């Protein structure tokens, strides 16, 4: 398994498997099976979706858990 700890606090671009959307965000926490990402654009999209709006609006400063298995790709700047 690759060490992903160096991705913490990095800006990333990511895409979910079976999704056309590409999102940007900041990795806030790295776990063995995924990432906690702060992605204002993704959260805004969910707030505008009637199916998610009521639940998402209640959360202050939301983070989104993205399982590694759900990622088509995750791009970060090379250092």
Image (tube, grey):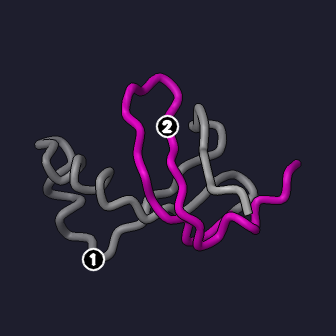
Q: Magenta residues?
A: 1-30
Q: Which mark is residue 8?
A: none
Q: Is residue 43 magenta?
A: no
Q: Which mark is residue 15?
A: 2
- Residue 56, quarter of picture: bottom left
Q: Which residue is mark 1?
A: 60
Residue at 65%, 44% in the rendered image: 68
x and y percentages locating residue 45 in the rendered image = 23, 47
Residue at 62%, 53% in the rendered image: 76
**Viewer-proximal residue, 15 or 55?**
15
Residue placed farthest to the bottom in the image? 60
x and y percentages locating residue 8 in the rendered image = 64, 70
Vertical arrangement, residue 55 with respect to residue 62, above or below: above
x and y percentages locating residue 25 in the rendered image = 45, 59
Labelled pair 2, 1 in contact (Cβ < 8 Å): no
**Viewer-proximal residue, 31 or 19?**
19
Circle 2: element type: strand
Q: Residues within 10 Å of mark 2 (few under 14, many from 20)?
A: some
Q: CA distance from mark 2 to mark 1?
A: 24 Å
């Amino acid at each position: 398994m690759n060490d992903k700890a160096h991705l913490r606090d990095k800006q990333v671009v990511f895409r979910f498997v079976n999704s056309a959307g590409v999102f940007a965000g900041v990795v806030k926490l790295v776990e063995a099976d995924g990432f906690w990402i702060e992605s204002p654009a993704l959260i805004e999209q969910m707030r505008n979706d009637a199916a998610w709006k009521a639940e998402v609006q209640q959360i202050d400063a939301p983070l989104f858990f993205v399982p590694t298995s759900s990622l088509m790709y995750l791009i970060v700047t090379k250092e």
